[in-house]
Each structure stands twice: as C-alpha cells, then as structure tokens.
Amino acid sequence: MNDYEAVIGLETHIQLNTTTKIFCACKADSWFDPPNTNICPVCTGMPGVLPVLNKAAVEKGVVLAAAMHAELRPLSYFDRKNYFYPDLPKGYQISQYDQSLAFGGYLDLPVPAANGQPAYIRKVSIHKLHLEEDAGKTKNAGHERLIDFNRCGVPLVEMVTGPDLRSPDEAAQYLIRLRQLLRWLGVSEADMEKGHLRCDANVSIRPRGATYLNPKTEIKNVNSIEAVRSAIEKEIERQIREVEAGHRIEAWTLEWDEEAGVLRKMRSKETEADYRYFREPDLLPIRLDDAWKADILKALPELPLVRRQRFMNAYGLPEYDADILTSERNLSDYFESAVKAYGSDPKRVSNYLMNDVLRMLNETSKTADRLRLTPAYLAEIIKLADAGTVNTSTAKSLLQKVEESGMAPGEIVAAEGLAKVSDDSAIRAVCLEVLAESPKEVESYKAGKVTLIGWFVGQVMKKMRGKADPTLARTILEELLA
Amino acid sequence: MSDSIDRDTFDHLVGLAALELDQQQADYLLRELNNQLKAIRELAAIPLDESVPASLHGVPYASAVSPELRADVWQPHPNPEEIIAQAPDTRDGYIVVPDIPHTTLE
Amino acid sequence: MELCDIPAYELSLLLRQRQISAEEVTRACLERIAAVDGRSGALDAGSLTPEDEQKVHAFITITRERALNQARTVDQKLAAGEDPGLLAGIPFTTKDIFSVRGTPSTAASRILANYTAPYTATPVARMEAAGAVMLGKVNLDEFTYGSSNESTAFQPAPRNPWNPAHVPGGSSGGSASSVAAGEAALSLGTDTAGSIRQPAAFCGVVGVKPTYGRVSRYGLIAFGSSLDCPGPVARNVVDAALMLQTIAGADPRDSTAAKVPVPDYLAQLEGGVKGLRIGLSPDYFRIAFPDPQTGEYREQSLPMDIESPVLRAAEVLASLGAEIVEDVPMPNTRYGIPAYFVISRVEAASNLHRYDGVKYGYRTRQPIDDLTKLYRQTRNEGFGLQPKLRILMGMYVSAAQYSAQYYQRALRVRTLIRRDFEQAFDRSGKHRLDALLTPTTPTTAFKMGAVYGDSVLMQYADQLTVPANHAGIPGLSLPGGLDADRLPVGIQLLGPDFSEDVLLRIGRAYELATETEDWRKVKPMVLR
C-alpha cells in the first residue's frame, strides 16, 4: 500500500425529504408500504403520462447547492437519460445533464488525527450537482427479479465529488460530514439504512506522488459508512494485487455485497455516450429568478463546520466539545441559547450539555428542541448551583425533574424545599448528633485517621437529605473534632 | 459526417434499441434509414450562425404563461391495483421479470 | 337527413329543446357504424374480403354500452332540467392514442393490444365532463407513425369514405373517416406533423391543430413530445370551435399546457374577416422532396387541383373584406421534413423505451430466462416496422457523437422555421399577417398501397403541415373543394400563437360564403 496512493471520488444520491415525489403527487416516503401501492400512472410510466415538477424538491436542491458553495443557474433544464432497466418504468430517467441546477462547489472536510497523523482539512470539490428522479427497487428471488415501483420518482440530488479523496477513511469521513449537513439543512433524513443517502465509489490507484489518473472501477451499492470503508479497502487491495501481477485495471462496474463482504462484477454497463441524453420536452426549464432564490436562501442556516469553528473561536471550546455540540443543528442551537441565557463561561454550559443533557437526549431519543428542559431552564439551574442555592448533585437531579415536570427550576426548588441549608446552627445541631452517634469513628479520627472527615460530612448530608452546604458542614465538624 | 449507416452500426443500433430483427426486416429498415438520412442531410447545408439558438419547443414559454410548479401536497392515486393489474406477471404485489445475471469477482 | 349526419351544434340545440334524445342520437350513430364501418380493426385479421374493401373500418373498439349509459345520463339531466354540459349528448370518437380508463388503449400497436388504461386523458375527460358521448376508440397509424393509416397493427386499416380504394390519411385516419362517414359528429385526434389536418383534408372535414400548449397532452400516448397536439376533427367550423372550447386550457397534469386564458370561440365565430390580413406564400405552392430513385432533391409545383381551391378561397375572403397579401416569403418551409425526421425520431425512440414487456402490454410468449432477451424478443414481436424505423433513426441521430450535427442542428433549424412565421405575423413587420392561407396537402388522398413502404415519400405528405408543428403555431384545415376524382381538397389557415379564435373566424366566414356551392352537396361514396 505504501508505494501506492488511492484516488477516490464519491457519487452520492440523496433522497430529499419532500412530502411527495418529484414529478407526481404520490408520497415520497413509502418505507413501510406494501410493494406497488404508493404508485400512480405517472411514476409507473403508464403510456401518455407527463411529469409535473414538485416545487419543494427544487427548493431543497437549491438549499443543498448553496450549502455546498455551488453556483446556482438562473435557468436549468431537465434531460432524459435513456436506458433499459426493470426498475425504470419509462425506460429513461428524468435527470439533469449539461445545464443542471448548480455547478462547482466544495466541502472542506476535517479529517481527525489518527495513527500518529495530525488532523488536517481535505478540500473535496463537487463536480456535479443535479436533481433527478429515483428508480424503483428490485430484489432477487431465485432466477427472477421482483420489482417494486413505490420508490420510483422520489426526488434525488445526485452529487459527485472530484477524485479528491485519498483513503477509505477520508471517504467515510466525507459521508459522515455529508450526512450531518443534510440533516442540519433539513433537506434529507439521510438515513443510510433506508437508502436516503446512497453512495457509489470510483476507485483507482497510482504510484504515490504521481499526478495522473489511472482507469477506475465504480463500486455500486455501498450504503453504509462501514461499507464504504470496507469496499474501498478491498478494492484498493485488489487493484494493487492486479497491478503487481502485471495486469491492467479495467473500468468495471462492481457491486458491493454487504452480507458476503465481497465485490461482484456487474455484467454489462452502457457507456455514457449510449444514454443519448436530450432535453426533456415534457418539462419547462427551472427559472430560479432572484426573488425566488432569495426567498429560499433566507432560511439557509449557518453551516455545521462553520459553526464548529466559531464555537472554538468565540466560546473557547475544545475541538472535542465543538464537534459534539455541532453534530446536530438543534443541539448547537440549544447550546447557543443556553450560553446566551447563562451569560458567561460557555465551557461550563458545555459540560452540563455534554455530560447530562446529551444522556437525557439519548435516553429519551428526543432532539434538543423537544426538551422541556429549555436552554433558559438549563441556564437557571447552572446559576442556582453557582450561587450556592443548590449543591451540584441537587442541580443534576433538577435537570431530570424539570424535564419530567416542565416546571421552572426555581419553582421546583421552592416546592420541594431543595434549597441548600446554610444556617450554621441547624447544621451544627446535626453535626453534634452525628458525632454523638459515632463514638468509634470519633476516636479513630482523633487518633489520626483524618480522612474520616468525609464520612462524617456524608452522614450529615444524609440526615439533612442532601440540603446541607457540605463545605460549611465540614468546617463545623473539623471545629467540633479539634 | 458518415455518409450512410453501415451494417455494423446498424447492428449496434439494433442492440441498443433492445430489438432483434429477422433478415428481411433488417434489410428494409437499413434501406429506409439510409433513404431518410439522405433527406436529413439537407440540414447540413443550412447556414446557421451564432444567432440561431436551439428551440426545444416552437412556442416560447415566457414566465407569464408557464404553469406554476406543483405544490408539495400528497394526493394518493385512488386505484393503484389497476396499474399493477396490467403487468404480465406478478407475485405478492411485485412485478416479476427474469433475472439479470451477475458474476462474482474472485 | 339522419340524426347521425346532423352537426354537433345543431344536435345540441335539438337536444336542449328536447326534440330528440341523446340515446336516439347515440343509436343513430351506432346504426351508421353498423352499416358502413365493417369489421373493426384487430390483430392478425387475415386477408381482406371484397366487402372489407368497401367499408370504412374507422374503429378499433366500439364502446357501445358505455356510450348508451352516458347518453341516458345526459337524457336524465335534460329531463331534470339540469345543465348537462356544453357537448351534452354529442357523439364523438377518440383516436386510440388516448388513454381512457377501462378501455383498451392500443396506439394501434400489438405491443399495447392487451393494455387497458387505468386513467383517462385530460381532453377525453373534458369531453365527457361536458356531456359528450364516446362511441369508441378509432384507428390510426401504429403509434401515429404514418400519413395513411396503413401501418396500423389493427387491420383492416381505415379507408377513405369518399372512395374506399383510397387512404383516409393519417395518422388520425380513424378520426377523420368516422366523422366524414357520419359515424360521429366529432373526433379527438392528434397532430404531430399534420396528423389531424392531413386526414381532415383527405376526408373533407375540418381539423384543428391547436397551438402547442393550448390543449393538455396528459393521456396522449407520446410520439414527438415537443410537437404533439391534441385537437378536434369535426364536420364544420362551428363544431370544431365547440369542441376546442371544451378541451382547451391549462391542466395541472401537463407542465407544457400554457397558462393562457381560453377565449369564447363561439361568441366571435361569425365576426367576419373585414380588415384581416391574409397571406399567400409561394413556398407553400411547391414541394421539395428527394427523388425516390436518385435521392436528388426535386422541386415541383403543386397540381392545379390543389392550388386552385386555395386561390379561390383567397378571392372569397377578399370579397368579404379581407386583405390578401401575396408573395410572403417562408423560405425555411422546405426544411420542415428533414428537421422533423430528426427531432420526432429522437423523441419517439425515447418515448418507446417504456414498452419492454415488464409493466403492461405485450410480453413475448417465448420461454425466456434472461431479461435482456425478454426485452428484445418482446419489442421485436410487439412493434411493427414503423416504430422500429423511428427507434433506430432516433438512436442514430441522438448518439453522443452525432447529436450536434443532427439533433442540435435540427433544433436550430426549428428556430429558423419559427422565425419565418414570426416575421410574417409581426405586427410591425412588412407583412403583418393575421393568417397564412395554404393548401393542406400536396396531393389529395392517394390510393391504398401507393406510397406505403416508402417511408421518405410518405413523410413528404406532411410537408405543408409540419412547419406549424415545429413553430408551435395553430393550424386549421377546411374542405376547399373536390378534385377531378371527386376527392376532397383541403385548405389550411396558419396563425400566430393562440390565434385559434381568428383562424376559426376566417374558416367560418369562408364556410358561410361557400355554403351553397355545388361541391358541398356531394356526399362521400360510402353514403351515396
């Protein structure tokens, strides 16, 4: 491997999370539907039907293109890509060819440190970005294929990177970041298991340091982060073996069989020239005028990698915190609201989020925006702890109580009498009580086992049901035991 | 410009078109194609400068007369079973076709 | 006069006055069909009998019960005093290129012979919503690919009611012949290069190719998607206007159905032609075509029988106050067919991709274990020669390496053809035409078998009609007289985008002015 360098480009198909399909009013998501029930004459290519473009599909495509820093075309066209396949009922796919919605673009991909290598940024260029319709599904049954058209016509963005990735890990990182972005933008559910985000990988190798491109193979159907990693690894190994054995790499199309963990060669593949692309006469061009574009893009949020950097710069968060807090848009919004409400020390807010709120989210499978523990309540709880009104463990249990009840933290503290007892005489009385009840421990302490002070504090806290100020209790105990 | 379609090109087209022809049909079709190409060749002589764009439709579609895009509202088709009833072979709601063979790479 | 011979507008009045019932009208049409149509088109029909050669054979499917039920519904509405719709009780036929739910929708091809459409085309749905009664689906060239109707897989092919030894024209041959023979008052056809106007001319009826985008294509089984236009075939201009009124207008199911308001065609219909500028172009009085033997281009002027009805119509219109503008140059007319050979084939090849034996229609009966073989066998057995020819040509001229020299070039030539019309109709230009008056066809109906098989010569039958399809503009074909063999001659009016109202008005003025001429009294041979 050391003598060779992998050159990898990824072709991704992203299902947009519109309500309906791209060219008809069937619903886009039919994951749980029986085969061939979410269909109509249009998406099954009945003779005589015509496509009618879904406005929301264009809008989501525009948002994604803008987030990839791509240039949007004011006028873009649909084309027919002609080929025979049983999951393609019209015998052509309505896609965009030479005048697609957008062109250019890139993603600055942060690659984490690994195996002694420092972290770095890989600039991944976007070669193609266009709208198209999804095909149906086929599955094997002995010597037959079973076809389900439910998925036909689901809106897709096809996004193709340049040959910019250099390792299976980078390819996996790209998909992870892309998935994060898609969810962040709200344009796709990006659930790879459900095929919302699918990936084909173009792989070639070349001697390390070379700048030319060798013939590549295309691996179809690599539909999980792990599959991308393993399939590419396997293919790089195979290509190295072939080259070392003096064979040429042929431009095959391979299919990744995830269960068996093997690559299969697909039998035939038409070359690009044979698709005979031509303009789709049944659709008018998409006119993305300035007003519409501005209207769509006013909802474009700050992008995750930008926000991640800002969290590090503006809030002084460590990269680890910034990464986790920007893994999901709701969570990062939550964090910022909480920091704002709290007013200082973002790291303190981050600690609460990373330790406690994240666990709460995982346990309840809620997103941050659905929590009853609002950012303002979180800030209030941290402030209560800061002021010494409640001690740390009370503060943590308050998080849970607020989430369960939806009540304001202050109200709960008042209602349940959770405020810390700082009254010297009350604590002193309990301390005396504890010492009186524990003659053996007092003796040990006095004999020099001073570490027992923690045990005495614990006993006092227990009697006072956690409400005592532990620092004060300790001071009193030390004084009494002196 | 190739002057006419030769037999090899013709056979390639037939394959691409997912057709299969007997000799008599092939002879007729090849002859007619080449006759039509003679007519088509007249296009080559027409002077076309930069000012002549392609027209996808004859009628220009200004924004004012172009229909709006479809609103993203689900309207289920009332009788999907009538669609599948047209398929020559079905099983358990699926359409059935013969296999598309693959070969495993060793 | 029998009920089935009465034009739609008059039938409509009689029905509303309740002098006749929709059921009576429907039964009259069914009787006429029984008398003159002969056996309907079918696959593997065997050889023709002498009797077959005397019949019209317009139909593929007669929807008798459906029609009678529709008629009874109209009668109930009339009896109840409800509004039964603009076309209530008017019998019509539908070219079998339109999907109609629950009926075979065959495109006259073996590959769709067993296909029953699960939905209804918008123009048909609009006809039925307006109360019109569909008598059945009529024959056409296979997938509309032809100008004679002989290429249908459903034989016997339709014959010309004026002389059954001649073709009715195509591809809407069943539409034109059913209307001419009094089997129905109206028919819904389609026009991709002249497929409404040419058979209308051959059969002595009125045919309208509306502006592209005027009538929804939803449910029309596509040939050349950028050229196809559904439109009316009728016995006179009033009926054509009535039908266009019903089917025109935007459709949420067709992205190319323009958002242009539909005028009241009937209200303006008899407004006359005073002040209208009507042009004549020398480029429409000659045809250029490659010699079948040498392939050399020959230019030929049109026969007198074709030319004189047009000139006479110009005189009539002039006498009614129209201004006739001569010598309007339309230099790119001759490129219409070559450009059409390219554009329509590319679109057709793609549109025919879906017929693969998987989802609907014909699947080969050979035992097959490989999908590719299934495709090839099915398409080989299911398609006739004309679809195959179009697929192969479309494949050839859209291949990546040829697309620029053929397909892209043809699309640019289309621009030139369009510019000829834009200049002629330019309000501030030299000619400022409201319409161009031309012959519809270079010949009258030719004999069956005379041209069929020569795909080039057949295509040139559309030379005078195809420019309107390239340009997208509307065209109207009207009966203009009879030739020496007593076959109808058509005259054509072409106008700017969405000027159907003006074309219909000119057509109606001509029709009224010539109402009493002798040739109008001659009946088609099958009705004599």
Image (cartoon, grey):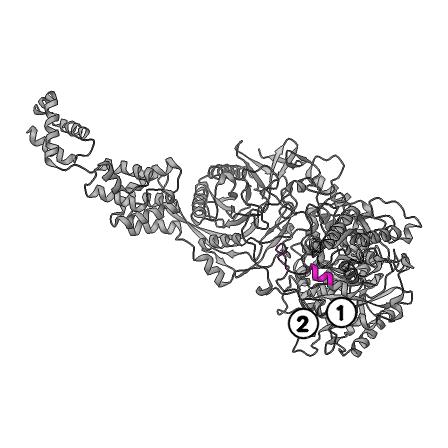
**Is residue A337 covered in magenta?**
no
What amino acid type should be assigned to the residue bearing mark 1?
A: Leu
- Label 2 crowd bin: few (<14), some (14–19), many (20+), radius 10 Å: some
Q: Earlier in the sequence, mark 1 or mark 2?
A: 2
Look at the image and tell me in which quarter the N terminus of chain C lies.
bottom right
Which residue in the structure is indicated by mark 1? C493
Identify the subunit bearing mark 2.
Answer: C
Say which element carries label 1. strand
Question: Foreground residue, A28 or C263?
Answer: C263
Q: Is residue A459 left or right of residue B53?
A: left
x 74%, y 56%: residue: C88
Residue C396 visible in rendering? no
**Is residue C247 covered in magenta?**
yes
Look at the image and tell me in which quarter the C terminus of chain C lies.
bottom right
Say which element carries label 2. helix
Residue B40 visible in rendering? yes
Question: Foreground residue, A117 or C230?
Answer: C230
What amino acid type should be assigned to the residue bearing mark 2?
A: Glu
Q: Position of residue C44 (x, y in %)?
A: 84, 44
Image quarter of residue C166: bottom right
User: Is the residue under label 2 in contact with that under label 1 (CB below 8 Å)?
Assistant: no
- Quote the CA–CA distance across marks 1 and 2: 15 Å
Q: Position of residue A445 (x, y in %)?
A: 10, 25
Give the vertical position of C444 relative to C149 (above or below): below
Identify the subunit bearing mark 1.
Answer: C
Which stretch appears magenta?
A: C242-255
Which residue in the structure is indicated by mark 2? C422
